[in-house]
Image: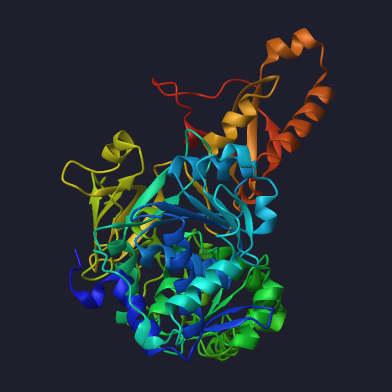
Amino acid sequence: MMTEEKYNFVKYFERSFKEHWELPAVTDYGTNVTLTYGQLAINIEKLHILFKESGIKKNDKIAVMGKNNSNWVAVYLATVTYGAIIVPILQDFRANDAIHIINHSGAKLLFISDINWEGIDLDQIPHVLMSVSLNDWHAISMALDPEKFNYEAIAQLFKQKHPEGYWAKDVHFDERSNEEIGSINYTSGTTGFSKGVLMPLNGLAGNIRYAFEVGLVYPGCRHVTFLPLAHAYGCAFDFLACLAAGGHTHLIGRTPSPKILLQAFSEIKPTTILSVPLILEKIYKKMIVPQIQKPPVSWVLKVPFLDEVICTKIREQLIQAFGGEFRQMIIGGAPLNPEVEAFLYRIKFPMSVGYGMTECAPLICFTPYDEGSKLYSCGKPLKGIMEVRIDDPNEEGIGEVVVRGENTMSGYYKKPDLTKESFTEDGWLRTGDLGLLDQDGFLYIKGRCKTMLLGPSGQNIYPEEIEARINNMPFVLESLVLQHEDNRLVALICPDYNEVDASGLTREQLTEYMEEARKQVNSELASYEQIAIVKLYPHEFEKTPKKSIKRFLYTNMV
């Protein structure tokens, strides 16, 4: 446990606000809204007043749901520096799933974007004292006195508390031990499948410490934040580490298409880039593949020494496309296409692949590009922070990856049995991934022993949740949701042929019905969980003695 004050999570931000008061902290990309560290600190102080007036106490939960913007950032930092626990909710979650998380976590305050609020039924969140708009801070609903709890009233209380203004010298956050819980990150929203990861401040501080040590962040660094802040990956480095260092994060609240991102990279010229594979793969296919498939270039690439000229040209072109000033690109959240990785490695593109999980806040392994990252590996365990071992390895050295260290969660909220199952008897966290460690300590992920899938932006997808919805549809006996190599989800459905025969449906009618069922199920799912294709399967799936479907037998069928 990191006990030194310099590693204390809350003190990281107290120091940063004091030292970088005049520097730009956050910009809502595409608008004229930029907040300095001083302006952000003032917003945090106003939120602290709101929390106190609302009766929020230490370790109470505060939920936040909405697109990336400066108000989201303020709510998160205000919550953890006040002594409360932040509950980030992915903006892609359906309203019912968000309601479940709000209630399961016991959140007393809810900060939410106007568009996300449209699907929320106030009667279904009875314990929430007040809901506040992330768009403009207006109170959407409340069980409190509306005359006392509004933006103008809080601004007046702020003036009374700080009649001479609020300055860098006034920034002081109450002590919080790194052992205290700072956040509850839900890996899913649905009842029965939701897992609220209890993350100590120590885990959040561990990622910040590592980012400092390897130079990912520093005063004046620039980040383009397009990964959802409610997801551990983007939150840890594009937001928390960047602002703890005095950097400037540009928040993209729109859907991060390659076109939008390339424009943002060109304008902002980030110094470090965090990305998920899908973005890089799309840019690779659009910019690079057409060049290397042309006969002259494809021929030259096969000739030793001459190929270096082409590789250098392509590398420089790609670097300029991302703004031209970044030190390295970090890929995480999902596996990178091996073909893309091999080519980028060949042209010496400054990129490294990392490995992590929400339960580790998220980083477990990473090796900076200039320290010699290896092709197809996800780096070494974070030195002095995380440890990795392979449990029950086979003859090839492949076994389950288990980890321990500063970044590890305390457990799952209100799920003691699941928490116990998730750790080995000697206290190592089971990742559910299969991997091996080479003689130099580099980790290679070889597969998943859990069924969880990863969405295009690193979102966790639990096929059992989707299957449960499909299986409730008429004429369905059982189903299996798998992922195509292009990340699309395919549902294999075994019909209940007895029910089909009794209804008199023809094959064509059954196919049409299943297509309508696909649309119905998709209407209940987040965008990244959408089923792209339904395939009818002729008989029941083969099962284990415990009656679990042997998924590995069907992975090649999509």
Q: Quadrant of the N terminus?
A: bottom left
Q: Nearer the viewer, residue 183 or 549?
A: 183
- Relative placement, left or right, of 185 versus 511 is left
Residue 36 appears at what percent x and percent y? 51, 85
In the rendered image, the quadrant that contains the C terminus is top right
- Residue 509 vs 238, above or below: the answer is above
Q: Is residue 340 visible?
A: no
Q: Residue at x 37, y 65 (%)?
A: 82
Q: Image check: 220 left or right of 437?
A: right
Q: Residue at x 48, y 90 (%)?
A: 23
Give residue 437's position: percent from left, percent from top: 27, 60
Q: Is residue 366 above or below residue 58?
A: below
Q: Position of residue 443 (x, y in %)?
A: 32, 62
Residue under the image location 56 percent in, 53 percent down: 145
Q: Choose between 338 and 4: the one closer to the eye.
A: 4
Q: Quadrant of residue 166?
A: bottom left
Q: Identify whether 551 is placed above or below 396.
A: above
